[in-house]
Image (cartoon, grey):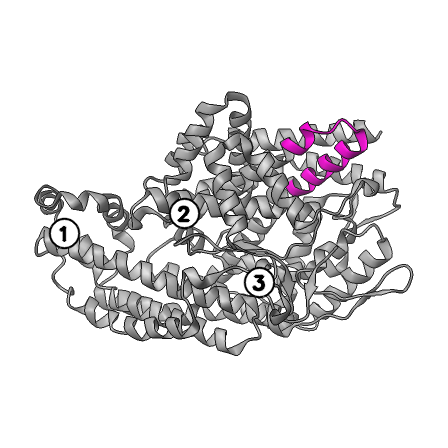
Amino acid sequence: MAVFYASRAEVPAEFTWDLQGLFASDEAWLAEYEALKALPEQIEAFRGHLGDDAETLLSWLREQDEAELRIGRLMGYASCRGDEDMGEAKYQDLRGKAYGLAVAVSSASAFAAPEIMALDEDRLNLFYVAQPALETYRRSLYQIRRRAAHILSPAEERLLAAAGEIAETPHTVSSVFSNADLSFPAAADAQGEMHPITNGGFVPLLESPDRVLRENAFKAYYGRLGEFRNTAAATLNGQFKGLRFFSEARGYESTLAAALDGTEVPPAVYHNLIEAVHQNLDKMYAYVALRKKLLGVEELHMYDVYAPIVSDAAVSIPFEEAKQTVLEALGVLGEDYTALLREGFENRWIDVYENRGKRSGAYCSGIARPHPYVLLNHKDTLDSLFTLAHEMGHALHSYHSVQRQPVCTSDYVIFVAEVASTCNEVLLMRHLLSRTTDKRTRAYLINHFLDKFKGTVYRQTMFAEFELMMGRLAEAGETLTAETLCEKYRDLNRLYFGPDMVSDEEISLEWARIPHFFYNYYVFQYATGFSAAVAIADRILTEGESAVRDYKRFLSGGSSADPISLLKIAGVDMASPAPVNAALALFGELVEELGTLLG
């Protein structure tokens, strides 16, 4: 059952997140906003003095910590409120105020990186001796100083910081347009009954066993989206022109190199992923051929890729049951872990159901104090069960890092961001498979896992390759037109799905509904994260307590080391192709097992 509320006011409080841990009221938020307006002036007092002595440098770093905490709370509240109903102008205004203040503080702080860069190494070492409390910030200071070639003069840094608010515009426009302004016609099923289409409800419609409904929903959705293809392309073009501007301003060889440098991930990891997936497309083609055979269709279309192969094994999973199943599946991580899950479930960390105007999809918010906040659009499906496990993986990763790291290293980088969430999904799947011997139920679960696998490794790598294409076009000075984007996307779709899939004309527009293309080379980490998660989950289930202990050390690591080193703590070496190859081999094995179960 898909729960949908016509307005935010109709949603029962127990199914909404409780934001009072951030601010008791909008008035309290506004009071803090007014107080924080003084921050840029306070920051100015440090200009030109960071190298004076150890005490001044320490005071500055602590001031930055305090500013990060307070602005984070401000932005967290405004962002969460804004996502509850993106058509509510009041909270879009608060979001704009918060972001504007953050940009002002960033602009005022622009002198810091050049001044820290200018510190002589010997002098900085003397600072550590004179003020031992600076050791807390050694990693943070290294992160600034290692990027010396890309740090500009104070005046130039100030200009780039001020340009940040403008650079956010394409993402903001795309998000508001997709979630608040864009509407879709209803789709008819085989009996002529009409079904509303929303961003959040589109994929569930494609999961229907009714092929007529799937096709009509698919064509209605993309037909409507196609009316705005030029607007979508212009917005995405603005995004990549902005990325090009910032990468060139800082002297990077490409937008990809600029994006990955901040997380200490070599660009070779990105390219190697695409190459590895290309070399294993035969397994994807085998999956597509099996799906076509099992669905019994003459032609397999893009609106068939979400349909359950074992439709009679699908069950409704109410939210209460989903929570209990997640608790059981993640019990292998220990009572301390499941106790935190219960706290999140019982104390309104989660905004559960869809309402009109609510942001689509699901996420764990960037704010983790006093605790993380999770947005869902729960549909009582198996997919929603996995989404709950996924987002709570993010939440508990953030919780562990915030509790065990100082402010300056409590935020983990995006390369490891998808590991904990996907590890939860793998553990959940292994749990579900372990408690069933029924062949059709097992086949249904394996099919669901294969769909997840396909969507996370193959599909996200396809997105990553498309994003790389867009970056290269922008770097070459070309405009990302709707015609160019549609042509390149459809070609990639054909490559990744193979000869047994009909690449419908409508799918060439799918790029226009992917919000992650505004996240700056984010999506490839879903694929690398999934590969790492498969390896970690296998180690947890085979080695037990020692592996769990190492995994929690990883969860608590924040950004205290580079991401490759952090994953090594959990027993995975992502500098090697082994985890990706092993994950793709597992995909192939599961395709074979599914074919045997249903053969």
- List the residue tagged with mark 1: 119
The image quadrant where one finds the C terminus is top right
Cα distance between the residues tagged 2 and 1: 26 Å
Q: Amino acid at mark 3?
A: Ala
Q: Position of residue 584 (x, y in %)?
A: 61, 33
Q: Is residue 446 magenta?
A: yes
Location of mark 2 (residue) = 413
Q: Nearer the viewer, mark 3 or mark 2?
A: 3
Q: Tag on residue 200? A: none
Q: Can you say whether 263 is above or below 439 in the image? A: below
In front: 392, or 192? 392
Give the x, y percent position of residue 124: 13, 46
Residue under label 3, please give it. Answer: 13
Whichever of callouts 2 and 1 sits on the residue coming sooner in the sequence is: 1
Between 31 and 108, the one nearer to me in the picture:
31
Q: Nearer the viewer, residue 167 or 362?
A: 362
What amino acid type should be assigned to the residue bearing mark 1? Leu
Residue 467 is a magenta residue: no
> Cβ–Cβ below 8 Å for labels 3 and 1?
no
Residue 127 visible? The answer is yes
Q: Position of residue 25 (x, y in %)?
A: 43, 70
Residue extending farthest top: 543
Whichever of callouts 3 and 1 sits on the residue coming sooner in the sequence is 3
Q: Which residues are magenta?
A: 431-452
Q: Residue at x 54, y 66 (%)?
A: 83
